[in-house]
Amino acid sequence: MICRDVQELIHGYVDGELDLVRNLEMERHLHQCAACSGMEGRLRALRTAMSGSLPYFHPPAGMEGRIRAGLRAAAQPEGRAPHFGLHWQWIGVAATLLLAVAGTWQVALMNRRPGDAEILAREATASHVRSLMASHLADVLSSDRHTVKPWFNGKLDFSPAVNDFADRGFALVGGRLDYLDNRSVAALVYQRRKHVINLFVWPAPREPDSGVQQSSRQGYNLLHWTKGHMAYWAVSDLNAGELESFATLVRSAE
């Protein structure tokens, strides 16, 4: 992918509208090209500023009723000469209101963006696929949690809990650094038969504990939850039932 291609797709990328393959190609180019990466940063900053500062106007209560009443009053009974001034006056009012509603709808569309969970699901899925495609599954390859956990020391501003569930069929493979939610995160890698599970972990100090939320994206199952002010996202092509069993093991060990 060259810069010209990126410039054509950058808006769709920022809005989360690209497919997985294009998304990965964009990420690869943005990591290598400072100019395009700067463009992406400016677009995201503009998007954030617009979504946080543009006003949203709600019509006052009773407006619809007053408009209808005014239009009925402007309609002339049979046999009477129409009062063109009043008739056109109300048509002008109605047209102005329609334009105002259309403008508000356009602003709402400009501000509409995927929810946080949807954005994280896209990022987590892309990171999972990228780890498989790039043959970069782990920075530290080990089934020993006493090797994997210390490896993160000094590389992150938190210490992730690392556990091995090999006796339950979910073997620890290793760990690596990754990037989600605009920050560095721990990626713990597990294996169930031939299925790889990426468990992404990072601090979420303002988030309350939550139950496990399930979703799927492009053939992959995703589970996410928050516990003890930590966010967890598990991604795999493993079937949903077995991935839920894995999540239960992780939650019980936290």
Image (cartoon, rainbow, N blue to C red):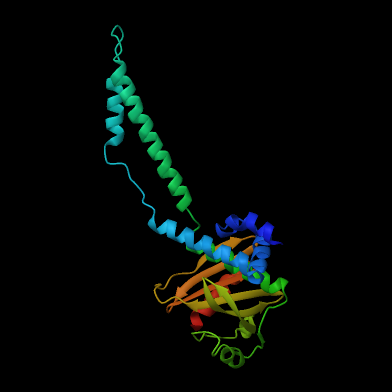
At a point 49% along the width and 80% down the height, the residue shown is 252
What is the residue that sits farthest to the front in this orientation? 35
At a point 60% along the width and 84% down the height, the residue shown is 165
Residue 128 falls in image quadrant = bottom right
- Residue 250, x across and y down, in percent: 53, 79
Residue 64 falls in image quadrant = top left
Rendered view: 60 above or below 249? above
| Depth check, front residue: 76 or 227 | 76
- Residue 192, x across and y down, in percent: 67, 76
Rendered view: 147 above or below 71? below
Query: Does residue 91 appear in this view?
Result: yes
Query: Does residue 240 appear in this view?
Result: no
At a point 66% along the width and 78% down the height, the residue shown is 191
- Residue 178, x across and y down, in percent: 59, 77
Quadrant of the frame with the N terminus:
bottom right
| Depth check, front residue: 220 or 113 | 113
Residue 173 falls in image quadrant = bottom right
Count of picture labels: 0
| Depth check, front residue: 95 or 166 | 95
Q: Horizontally, is 114 left or right of 217 in the view?
A: left
- Residue 194, x across and y down, in percent: 72, 75
What is the residue that sits farthest to the top in this orientation? 79
Rendered view: 118 above or below 155? above
| Depth check, front residue: 89 or 68 | 89
